[in-house]
Amino acid sequence: MPKVLVSDRIDQSGIDILSQVAQVDVKTGLSPEELIRIIPDYDALMIRSGTRVTAEMIAAGKQLKIIGRAGVGVDNVDVPNATRQGILVVNSPEGNTIAAAEHALAMMLSLSRYIPIANQSVKEGKWERSKFLGVEVYKKTLGVVGLGKIGSHVAAVARAMGMQVLAYDPFLSAERAEQLGVHLVDLDLLLRESDYITLHLPKTAETYHLINAEAIAKMRPTARLINCARGGIIDEAALAEALKAERIAGAALDVYEEEPLGESALRELGRNVILTPHLGASTEEAQVNVAIDVAEQIRDVLLGLPARSAVNIPGLRPEILEKLRPYMQLSETLGYLVSQLAGGRVETFNIRLQGELANNESQPVVVAALKGLLSHALQERVNYVNASIEAKERGIRVTEVRDPNSRDYAGSVQMTAVGSQGEHTVTGALLGEEEIRITNIDGFPINVPPSRHMLFTLHRDVPGIIGNIGSLLGDFNVNIASMQVGRKIVRGDAVMVLSLDDPLPENVLPEITKVAGIRDAYTITLPAS
Ligand SMILES: NC(=O)c1ccc[n+]([C@@H]2O[C@H](COP(=O)([O-])OP(=O)(O)OC[C@H]3O[C@@H](n4cnc5c(N)ncnc54)[C@H](O)[C@@H]3O)[C@@H](O)[C@H]2O)c1
Ligand SMILES: O=C(O)CC[C@@H](O)C(=O)O
């Protein structure tokens, strides 16, 4: 039974799902050293934001197949290293959207009405009504930085509360902004015009300290800033300075550059600052949602099925995958085949996606081809997660062409491997829904299903050659299951494809190449299906 380590607190509903297929060990609060020590035993790891999955931990996780992040942000996972090691990283992109949006809205209202500090005052036995004169959000301007899933929900609720909404999101279309009823503006204008500014963008190299002293200086003195996205997007020292000097009216933070928040000037500030300990996703509903979402994906991957929210395999959505699966199988088979024809090191790999594959959703078919191409050399070390990166690291130049024309078939894949020992091209298509056919080898039309053991020859199309090969194989006790010849012109060059019941003994290939008229011969072994 596979083993799953759950190293942060996860809702029981997730544990129950994992337990259907795996031994589940819940071990929270472990030190990085302890995690590195025990991770080699595990096939899967499930985390929230508490566990940092470092390069060292990934290197130690020799058995790891999948890391599941019960939440959105994967900035606590070294995704590039996981990808390199062929480990799938999945998350729950939508499970806590509403929770995080509602937390940001709660922060906005709490800041406006001094709720946390007024609550504390009453609990201390005081009755300070005039001290906590608040402001209304109605008819005020909210600036949303990052109008994705959470930002959009915040914008919709804010509009319902009578706010005008400005948004800055360089990746959002004007049409989408219009649909949401918000005004898309540049960051500068948003900072200058907003009464409230709420951040809902990822932390990246570009967004690090996006809100720094310079940005804060542009804000209105009455502005209130909210960050329920990621620490590090705000320069905390600059913010603390500005709040201390009352340059802006307030700030509410749920996330910090270092978590847990250590010594910080922010802690010393008064009623104009609200700090929560990364609670954006902490609702009962969100925790059930993310636990189920991610546990189901881990379960499926351990059962050999695809995951629906893979962070490091772009575009592999289940509905697309369902349609592409037979083509991926075809592409992987052809990749395997062409790498063996090419023999040595492949330097350039050209793939042509034809007919119904000539669209942007067919990227997994390219990944499958690369997996096939590299499998012969790397065996199980290569998978759909790391095939592209492995190809790149081996210096293979990959080019893709999409061509809506596909003669005779709804869709077909052609691939050419150019390497140290020459150039070979194979084409394949599906017969019906999923029967794979090799339809062309090096320009010679054929129509053969792939089989586990095959022999390809390039020869002169002259009488007797097929008989000679047949008797030679007979002499070595090799049984031929099927045979097909492809040629362009009569008595010109031809290819012969033989499916064999058994692997060709090593000493037979040199004998075949000695047969008169044979120019080249290749043995091909495909993975057992
Ligand atoms: N506090 C919490 O507990 C909590 C919970 C959930 C999510 N989050 C965080 O909230 C953030 C938003 O999550 P989401 O689910 O809405 O993500 P999302 O991917 O749906 O939206 C992010 C948006 O940010 C935009 N963006 C990217 N770079 C930008 C830039 N430089 N400037 C402006 N916009 C930019 C993107 O175009 C996208 O529309 C993430 O950082 C996530 O990790 C925090
Ligand atoms: O795990 C958590 O509670 C935080 C999750 C949140 O930051 C996220 O990115 O989904």
Image: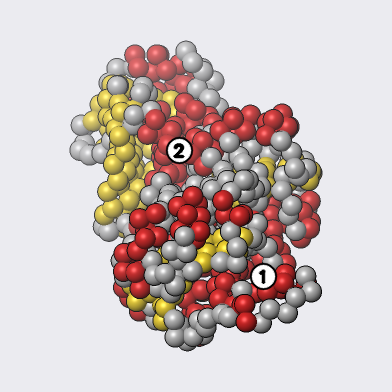
Q: Name the residue under label 2.
A: 387
Secondary structure found at label 2: helix
Residue drawn at the location 41% of the way across and 46% of the way down: 205
Residue 311 position within the rendered picture, expressed as x and y whole percent measured from the top left: 51, 50
Quarter holding residue 7 = top right
Residue drawn at the location 21% of the way across and 36% of the way down: 490
Above or below: residue 161 compared with residue 19 = below
Residue 303 position within the rendered picture, expressed as x and y whole percent measured from the top left: 67, 48
- Tag on residue 307? none
Q: Which of 139 and 112 is in front in this view?
A: 112
In the drawing, does residue 452 fall left or right of residue 395? right
Is residue 379 visible in the rendered image? The answer is yes
Q: Quadrant of ligand 2?
A: bottom right
Q: Which amino acid does label 2 sit on?
A: Ala
Q: Nearer the viewer, residue 42 or 187?
A: 187
Q: Name the residue under label 1.
A: 116
Q: How crowded is mark 2: few (under 14 residues within 10 Å), some or many (20 or more)?
A: many
Residue 389 position within the rendered picture, expressed as x and y whole percent measured from the top left: 42, 36
Residue drawn at the location 62% of the way across and 45% of the way down: 263
Q: Compute the Cα span from label 2 to label 1.
A: 52 Å
Q: Which amino acid does label 1 sit on?
A: Pro
